[in-house]
Image (cartoon, grey):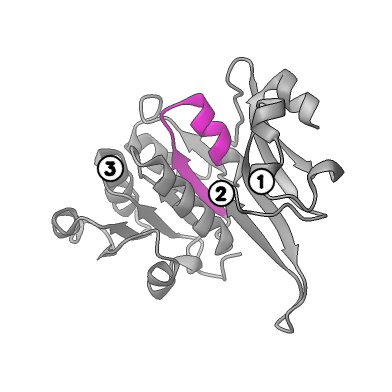
Amino acid sequence: MPKTGEKRKFAVVGLGRFGFEVATKLFELGVEVLAIDQDAKIIDEIQDKVTLAVCLNATRKSLLLEQGIDKVGCAVVGIGEDFEANVLVTSLLKGFGIPRVITRSYTDLQKQILTTIGAARVVSPEEEVGGRLAQSLVSGSIVDFLELPEGYMVRQVPAPAAIVGKRLAESGARKHFGVDIIVVKRQIPDAGDGGPKEEMIVIPDGEVEIREGDILGVVGRAKDVDKFI
């Protein structure tokens, strides 16, 4: 949770047209804004329009932490076309403990995946312009929502006993049930530094072994997800 006095700090990661508008409008509304993009030209263009503009690869956890992004009260992920990068950055920001992470998507299925990994809201740029989003963030009028695509669903379920101990590639989730496991969440035992930690594996590869107690984020047709459960 943000410390006292840090509630008005925002970060915007990905400064395309949408992210650029969100960042500059937030700054105009009187809040502190950390703007991040890996395009140096965009950073040069926005540096006088936000509190701090930094050129870096936002999929690098250590680089984000060096900028103090874990101290903001809200982060907006403006990454558009590179959905994998969007998912990775959203997951990192949630892992930092940022109270609210807002991101964007192009399809309903992408929206459900991003919601499953913890995004407080997933915005379609075609539905909501950046300036309006900035206004709602500052006024505190954001309303979380989950809109399921027709015929599909995303569920978080305990790992079925039948696949515990198996690699994801051996689980038969897609072959036998027609579903994809998009997130694996598990508790890591106390390592002597303050208690157990939660690990989140986003878009796991086939070598990830399913463990007892894992929580799986599963996406597919509703009837197939029900069958898998």
Q: Which residues are drawn in magenta?
A: 100-114
Residue at image point 40% right, 25% down: 127
Q: Are marks 1 and 2 in contact (CB under 8 Å)?
A: yes
The residue beneath circle 3 is 21
Q: Nearer the viewer, residue 171 or 82?
A: 171
Q: Earlier in the sequence, mark 2 or mark 3?
A: 3
The nearer-to-camera label among 1 and 3 is: 1
Disc 2 to disc 3: CB gap under 8 Å: no
Between marks 1 and 3, how big is the CA–CA gap? 40 Å
Q: In the rendered structure, which disc, 1 or 3, sits on the residue that comes first in sequence?
A: 3
What's under tag 1, amino acid-wise?
Answer: Leu
Label 3 residue SS: helix
Q: Is residue 7 magenta?
A: no
Q: Which of marks 2 and 3 is in front?
A: 2
Which residue position holds label 2? 205
- For residue 168, the mark is 1
Q: What element carries label 1?
A: helix
The x and y percentages for residue 214 are 76, 52
| Residue situated furthest top in the rendering | 150
User: Distance from label 1 to label 2 (Cα)?
Assistant: 7 Å
- The mark that comes first in sequence, 1 or 2, is 1
